[in-house]
Amino acid sequence: MGLSRRGFFHTLGVVGGGTLASATCARASSAGPQRDHSNDMGVLVDVTKCIGCRRCEYACQEAAGFDPPDIESFEDKSVFDEQRRPVARSHTVINRYSRPDGSGPVYNKFNCLHCLDPACASACLVSAFTKNDTGPVVYDPSRCMGCRYCMVACPFEIPTYDYDYPLTPQVRKCNLCAHRVPSEQELPACVKICPAEVMTYGRRGDLLELAHERIANNPDVYIDHIYGEHEAGGTSWMWISNVPFEEIGFHKVDSKAPPRRTEAIQHGVFKNFLPPLMWYGLLGAAMWLTRPEKNDESKEGDQHAEVQS
Amino acid sequence: MSAHHHPPQPMNQKLITPGVLVLLILTGIGVCFAIWRFIFGIGSITNLDNQHPWGIWIAIDVATGVALAAGGFTTAALAHIFHREHYHAVVRPALLTAMLGYTFVGLGLMIDLGRFYNIWHPIVPAMWSGHSVLFEVGLCVMCYLTVLYIEFLPIVCERLEKEERWPRVRVFCMKLNGLVGRIMFFFIIAGVVLSCLHQSSLGNLMVLAPSKMHDLWDTPILSLLFLLSAFAVGFPMVIVESMVASRSFKLKPEMHILSPLAKFVPVLLGIYLGFKVGDLAVRDKLSLIGEGSPQATMFVVEMVFGVIAPFIMLLFARVRKSPTGLFIAALMIVLGVALNRINVFLVAFQPLYPQKTYFPSIGEVAVTVGLISLLIFCYRVIVNYFPVISHPGQARAT
Ligand code: SF4
Ligand code: SF4
């Protein structure tokens, strides 16, 4: 097989054009995490107020369309013997923690934190997870391939999966009731049902102010930390507490949003598609320069570089 | 110029041997479990849960599969881009492995993906997400698989050109072969570029989950380490395969090609080793090696048996020239890189709220073993009927 010099450079040019074109598209779709999030809707949880009635679990299951059992059955306290996690049929759970000094239990609520720069959305290769302009991180099952990379990526281990559905499994998590809170006047189901007013629904900026105020006014009650203010780059759900967060099931999470790690690397490697193109060019040049000169054994004429496959 | 002296020929041996029967039985068992998965869901045959979304189907079928297919682009680069003609004889077997390897990565994914019928979604521009590491991996793998099929075309054409029974097909294949040959250099370079891109990005996947990764593997240069280990494992994989193939077709191992090829390995493996140790040193995590955790043990096994020992062995010409020594050293590297991928995707991955520990189920193992068996069977069928292996000792078919 021979190939002519002209063909060689011609094809190189065609490739160049093609990759550049796709580079523009790839750049257009890159995430914009750095917008101002103080107007996003979010929730402030005050764990000191929670009485562990689990009505929010009931309301959440109902809002998600899962036909929960009787609300009375949620008064069963034996579930607190274990530390539970959100599951595909229940996107929020309340867990009970006892304090070292034995002074009464503390209850904590777990659900998607609706990160400002969500790792799940950065992970998803088909944009099935996106962050709404109003705050919620929502999921579109019709795009999803079911690779579960979003579950690997979430720094709070929130998304769950329909492992028992053979054909139409979905990734399941709280969507901040995005499907049923069209106006800011409505409340997410868990916020609405809570009899102890544990949760405040509002703009993130206002919630932060409120949280700081509460901590400042009651320094002997609250620890000086708003979980979610900076964790993983900040989240729309935030928590204040009278016990350190590590004691009520939260992990220390770096303030740098995980996507900033990978996207910095990826966008470096693909910067305007130049690095891959240069790599292509370099290899092409190497191929050209090391081609065997007038190979005796080659039956090709001398204006042909020999490529044998 | 061994390629000229011994053009690749179909092996033309008996297809069904006891070994092949075993492969077919294992494949059958895997297929049964796979059918079960499509009827009753992933949860019914795997030990995956919300804390362990990825198991061996990703760590072995996909991540290890991609790594061990690296022989395809490394030999293509060596023989075609840097024109080391001496090595032409190993290019086709390596190409076949890569082509089958990536095809089976796709098959494995089809079983693991919850909505497998959406596997084509990444090519829809409306769904593109250029910030997703997995998007880059997915798109590169799809492109590369296409490139591999094109690179394989000449082999198919050569075979059909000789087919007396179908004159039309012969003419068509001759034309197609000529055409493809003229633009092949384009695909060869593209294949190398695409390989470098996704081999490295595969490592970047886990960089997105720092809070769940054990510190021994949680490094921002994981993608570089993946790329360097892919470079390092390419030739050893070719060596292992070539020797296994020679043995199974009762031919002498091609030491005159494999020994010189092994000379490159300590260099590539040494660079990988340097970066691996340097990374730990820079991140100040060297002391973790002695922490005694299961993770630390796996790390030591990976490094000592998969990298350091074969690195030292291959420094000696005596080992490189001895079929047994070379085979053992190359196999250690292959297993070492496989263990590295398993370590990164499974062992290092520590859920924040573990309910149980993950260990692959019988179903998961059966499917993985079935896929590998089917791959080996396909390899055997193809080298038997298509001109892939060039060997001085083989029977010439005319
Ligand atoms: S908590 Fe997890 S699932 Fe929720 S938005 Fe953040 S990354 Fe996504
Ligand atoms: S499982 Fe679905 S939503 Fe999650 S990353 Fe994969 S395609 Fe995206």
Image (cartoon, rainbow, N blue to C red):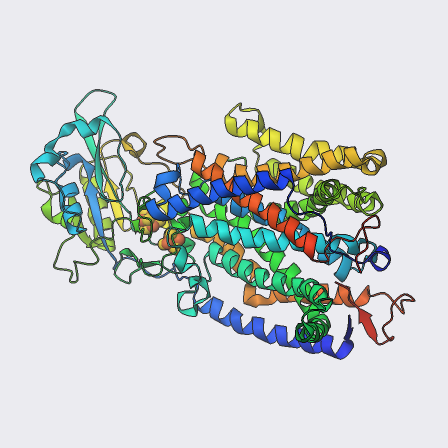
Tell me if residue B206 comes above or below residue B291 in the rendering.
below
- Residue B122, image quadrant: bottom left
Residue B218 visible (yes or no): no
Q: Residue at x 8, y 40 (%)?
A: A70
Q: Furthest-front residue in view?
A: B165
Q: Residue at x 52, y 48 (%)?
A: B62
Q: Position of residue B138 (x, y in %)?
A: 50, 57
Left or right of A159? Residue B341 is right
Q: Position of residue B294 (x, y in %)?
A: 51, 26
B261 and B243: which is toward the camera: B243
Q: Residue at x 56, y 33 (%)?
A: B285
Q: Position of residue B206 (x, y in %)?
A: 49, 45
B28 and A267: which is toward the camera: B28
Residue A23 visible (yes or no): yes
Tell me if residue A279 comes above or below residue B232 in the rendering.
below
Left or right of A204? Residue B277 is right
User: Number of marks in the image?
Assistant: 0
Q: Furthest-right residue in view?
A: A296
B140 and B245: which is toward the camera: B245
- Residue B351, image quadrant: top left
A72 and A212: which is toward the camera: A72
The quadrant in which the N terminus of chain B is found is bottom right
The quadrant in which the C terminus of chain B is found is bottom right
Q: Position of residue A258 (x, y in %)?
A: 43, 49
Left or right of A238? Residue B172 is right
